[in-house]
């Protein structure tokens, strides 16, 4: 199992979490689908649940919370990019044309975080680890394996993430229209336009979880109340499906090509 025990390089997707209307139902759904274990967390952290796979953290699930008088956030998976200094990242995001949605805050002794939107409107988080590095198992069935930015303006988004996080964005070989987000020469995520998304889809970060059999996992998702948005199809990187959980959170799953 590919385990992660050291800090992620800045700009690398390092964690994902879900804000759900019904946290307990979401915990049960992903337990049945991917084998995650998770319990409602301490009240001082809003009940935030760190879900594990074989004892290693893979993702977070929390109940929705909104400031008084503000609408509840959408039911979406949020991608967090690693940072060595959240305050410096906040400044860099602003200088590059991003928008702060939640300023830097301390999360106990686990780390520091913020939430922002890039100039095309895609929302993402930033995580500076202290006692918690993020996902500690990846690229295994049931774990996070890829994060794609779907954007309305590829050049603008490419320039933003390069300026704010020091990443390099370059075309991916054999995947026309698809760019890779590279850290230290290694692809850590993707960037693509919205041409293949339904009309009206806003810019967003899409998470992708690995599975050992995309078709059977899709069947299991449907039996548990999920929705298929794009049935399993073959791509150069593997067999992929786009789905939504029973509360509407969209994610992809893939059985990687050997």
Image (cartoon, rainbow, N blue to C red):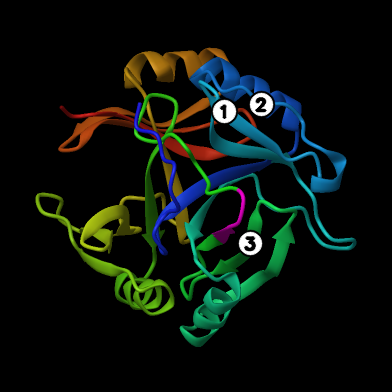
| Residue at image mark 3 | 113
What residue is shown at x 60% (from left), y 56% (from top)? 130
Left or right of residue 180, residue 204 in this image? right
Q: Taken as a whole, is the magenta stretch helix, strand or loop?
A: strand
Residue at 79% over, 46% down: 45
Binning the other alpha carbons within 10 Å of mark 1 as few (below 14), some (14 to 19) or many (20 upward) gives many
Q: Secondary structure at mark 2?
A: loop
Name the secondary structure under disc 1: strand
* Mark 2 in CB contact with mark 3 (< 8 angstroms): no
How many C-alpha atoms fall within 10 Å of the one at disc 2: few (<14), some, or many (≥20)?
many
Q: Which residues are magenta?
A: 126-131
Asked whether residue 11 is drawn in magenta, I would say no
Give the structural element (helix, strand or loop) at label 3.
Answer: strand
- Residue 62 lies, in percent from the top left, at 71, 40
Q: Position of residue 144 (x, y in %)?
A: 43, 37
Query: Eyeballing the image, is 141 above or below 7?
Result: above
**Which quarter of the figure has residue 86?**
bottom right
x and y percent of residue 232 in the render?
31, 26
- Distance from label 1 to label 3 (Cα)? 20 Å
Which residue is situated farthest in the right direction here? Answer: 68
Q: How many marks?
A: 3
Mark 2 or mark 3, earlier in chain: 2
Quarter of the image where the N terminus is located: top left
Q: Which mark is residue 38?
A: 2
Q: Are marks 2 and 1 in contact (CB under 8 Å)?
A: yes
Q: Reading the chain from its start, which is encountered first: label 2 or label 1? A: 2
Q: Are marks 1 and 3 in contact (CB under 8 Å)?
A: no
Label 1 sits on residue:
52
Q: Give the quadrant of the C terminus.
A: top left
């Amino acid at each position: 199992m590919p385990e992660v025990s050291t800090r992620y390089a800045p700009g690398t997707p390092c964690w994902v979490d879900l804000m759900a209307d019904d946290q307990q139902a979401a915990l049960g759904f992903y337990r049945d689908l991917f084998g995650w274990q998770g319990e409602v967390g301490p009240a001082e952290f809003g009940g935030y649940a760190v879900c594990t796979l074989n004892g290693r953290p893979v993702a977070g699930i929390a109940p929705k919370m909104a400031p008084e008088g503000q609408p509840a956030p959408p039911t979406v998976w949020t991608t967090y990019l690693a940072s060595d200094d959240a305050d410096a990242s906040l400044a860099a995001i602003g200088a590059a044309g991003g928008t702060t949605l939640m300023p830097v805050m301390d999360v106990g002794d686990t780390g520091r975080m913020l939430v922002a939107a890039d100039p095309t409107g895609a929302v993402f988080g930033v995580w500076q680890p202290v006692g918690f590095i993020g996902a500690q198992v990846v690229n295994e069935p049931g774990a996070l394996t890829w994060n794609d930015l779907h954007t309305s303006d590829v050049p603008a988004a490419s320039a933003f993430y390069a300026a704010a996080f020091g990443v390099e964005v370059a075309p991916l070989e054999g995947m026309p229209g698809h760019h890779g987000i590279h850290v230290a020469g290694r692809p850590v995520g993707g960037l693509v336009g919205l041409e293949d998304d339904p009309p009206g889809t806003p810019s967003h970060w899409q998470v992708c979880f690995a599975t050992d059999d995309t078709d059977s996992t899709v069947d299991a998702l449907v039996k548990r109340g999920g929705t298929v948005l794009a049935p399993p199809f073959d791509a150069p990187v593997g067999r992929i499906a786009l789905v939504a959980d029973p509360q509407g959170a969209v994610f992809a799953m893939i059985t990687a090509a050997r």
